[in-house]
Amino acid sequence: MKNDDDQIRRQQWSNDIKEYQHNKNKLEWGVNPQPLVRTYKMIKTEESSFNPILQYYNNTSIEENLRNSYNKNLVTQLAKNKVLLNKHNF
């Protein structure tokens, strides 16, 4: 009688462990998302995107876009200043 009880308990325990492992692998909300691993290289590129000593961006596309917008704004500002100078000739 006691051996039967022990065997039933062992079988129950074995079933509980298998169910736990199955439930642990299959979460209710789906697949576990892979965590984002931030490498040293990623952190350094984020920190060093702008060089404050040389005053330029390491990314050439950003640097080129800023240079073009600066030149465009410079031309328009010079044109406005010239109009104001001709308008208010002292």
Image (spheres, grey):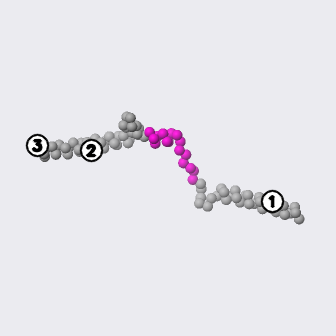
Residue ID for mark 1: 10
User: Is residue 40 on the magenta stretch?
Assistant: yes
Q: Residue furthest front?
A: 90
The mark found on residue 73 in the picture is: 2
The numbered mark, 2 or 1, whose residue comes first in the sequence reads: 1
Cα–Cα span, label 2 and label 1 = 81 Å
Report the magenta residues as a range.
33-48
Residue 20 point in image, percent of width and height: 70, 58
Pair 3/1: label in front? 3
Element assignment for label 2:
helix
Q: Quadrant of the C terminus?
A: top left
Which residue lies at the image location 73% right of the left edge and 58% below the top edge?
18
Q: Amino acid at mark 3?
A: Phe
Count of marks placed on residues: 3
Cα–Cα span, label 3 and label 1 = 104 Å
Residue ID for mark 3: 90
Q: Amino acid at mark 1?
A: Arg
The numbered mark, 2 or 3, whose residue comes first in the sequence reads: 2
Are the residues flagged by discs 3 and 1 in contact, CB closer than 8 Å? no
Pair 2/3: label in front? 3
Q: Which is more toward the observer, 79 or 81?
A: 81
Residue 19 point in image, percent of width and height: 71, 60
Work out whether 2 lies above or below 48: below
Cα–Cα span, label 2 and label 3 = 27 Å
Badge 2: residue crowd in 10 Å (few <14, some 14–19, many ≥20): few
Which residue lies at the image location 53% right of the left edge and 42% below the top edge?
39
The mark found on residue 71 in the picture is: none
User: Is residue 38 on the magenta stretch?
Assistant: yes
The numbered mark, 3 or 1, whose residue comes first in the sequence reads: 1
Badge 3: residue crowd in 10 Å (few <14, some 14–19, many ≥20): few
Which residue lies at the image location 74% right of the left edge and 60% below the top edge?
16
Residue 25 point in image, percent of width and height: 65, 56
